[in-house]
Amino acid sequence: MTEKKTQPEDMMEKIISLAKRRGFVYQGSEIYGGLAGTWDYGPLGVKLKNNITNLWWSMFVDGREDMYGIDAAILMNPEAWVSSGHVGGFSDPLVEDLKTKKRYRADHLLEDIGVDCKGMKIADLDAAIREHKVKSPEGNELGEVRQFNMMFSTHIGATDDAASVTYLRPETAGGMFVNYKNVVDSFHPKLPFGLGQIGKAFRNEIAPRDFIFRVRELEQMEVEYFVRPDDWENQFENWRKEMWKFIEAVGLDKNKVHELEVADADRAHYSKRTIDFEYDYPFGRKELYGLAYRTNFDLTSHQNGSKVNLEYFDEETKEKFLPHVIEPSLGVGRTMLAVLLEAYTEDEMGGEVRSYLKFHPRIAPVKAAVSPLLKNKPELVEKAREVFAMLKSEVPQIMWDDNGNIGKRYRRQDEIGTPFCIVIDFDTLGENPEHKDTVTVRDRDTGEQKRMPISELNAFVKSAIK
Ligand code: GAP
């Protein structure tokens, strides 16, 4: 058996096609021709996504004593986004095709011809566009580079005047800052402590691209960790380590993840230090996650904007102050894409090329598939149903599969990354008395089968998915 990692050039096509064929990710509103920057998660995609978000929640919220989970509304009072600086400053540098009036990201056009845009301000980008005589993808002249706000606005209530405007949140963080005081009042946590949230955020990306990498409707897993001002460096280091632990636990190759110290000019307006965790995607080394030191920028701005005192009162020292914030921010879609890319493997088995997803069993959407060897033998089906019910009662992500012949089932389960295929055959029923009440368990990666007593199956699957 020779294992081959697919070449980067065709990797994305293979992943996108497998994701659609097997029900992981579909194009958003596909029957209407799609909607750029939106993707829908299918039955297996939602299982995989839940496994990722559940892992994050158990590591970053439930597994800790200092974390409080919340689920805030996506629509917020627009004043919150004025205070946070997003109304004024959450923008991308755009340039317009003077003929078609289509807009493009100036930095993307420059990067496409090999210009490194790190640290460039609007004027630098504009100068670079002129210097390199960059044209639009249609070959037309480009206008001046301008900032373009990325928030989606909408109207609340029956009127659609300026007073009714609000925004779909561009980051889940906002919902945590406005609930910081609620949590302090309900739980009286001691510093350091954090709020954690998983949820949707929306950005009017001018150039959504690379499948689920850059989308307009995204999902984030974020922590706002409140610390004493003089403790930020220590806590920043702690969260850096926690992020690496998550990267490992979710099954990513650490050698493909790289830290990047973000330059002053490239940091978000609220950050005094940011490390990007970049991943080697087939389309280049790009941001997977971010870790930011947001100082007390947000609590100060929300205190000023809301006129509500957000100071923390330290019972021990009797001090009052606005805590500083460390923010590990992880994208769900970018994790899922990296996990899919990492898992995609091709090899040769039984003289045929096979492609399969080598997920860690912890992340695999289906942990095991249960089949009767032949679906037209009621005695095999009955026993297989018994085994299936027993396993499913303890590990819900078990699939019943009696479709097609056994070879086809194995291929299908390999392609969706099911670590184990459990088959009930005539030996299980006692045809060979030595094997009575045992089943075959086939390993996805090696294709090897071993017999195992039914009584050991639950423990076997549970220990594999830990
Ligand atoms: N609260 C901080 C924040 O939102 P960010 O660097 O803008 O910081 C954090 O985003 C993470 O959200 C990114 O590292 C990435 O994983 C994910 N993300 C951001 N924009 C995205 C987009 N358009 N599509 C998919 N994921 C995105």
Image (tube, rainbow, N blue to C red):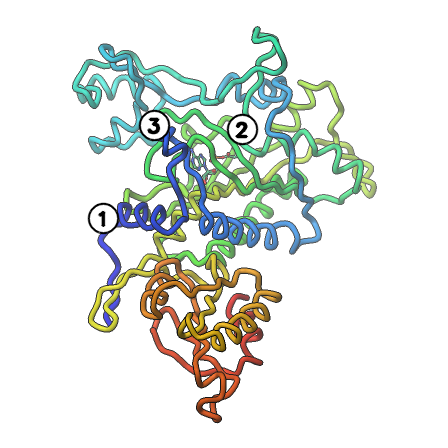
Indicate which disc residue 206 carries.
none
Vertical placement of residue 207 versus 426, above or below: above
Q: Quadrant of residue 136?
A: top left
**Precedes in sequence: disc 3 or disc 1:** 1
Asked whether 179 or 456 is in front, the reply is 456
Residue 77 point in image, percent of width and height: 64, 20
Judge left or right: residue 253 versus residue 464.
left
**Precedes in sequence: disc 2 or disc 3:** 3
Asked whether 425 or 296 is in front, the reply is 425
- Element type at marker 2? loop
Residue 378 point in image, percent of width and height: 48, 74
> From the viewer's perspective, is the residue at label 2 or at label 3 nearer?
3
Asked whether 139 or 432 is in front, the reply is 432
| Residue count near mark 2 (Cα–Cα under 10 Å), binned few <14, some 14–19, many ≥20 | some
Residue 413 point in image, percent of width and height: 38, 63
Vertical placement of residue 465 versus 331, above or below: below
Cα distance in 3D space between marks 3 and 1? 21 Å
Asked whether 435 or 165 is in front, the reply is 435
Residue 215 point in image, percent of width and height: 41, 33
Residue linked to disc 3: 207
| Amino acid type, residue under disc 3 in the picture | Ala
Residue linked to disc 1: 10
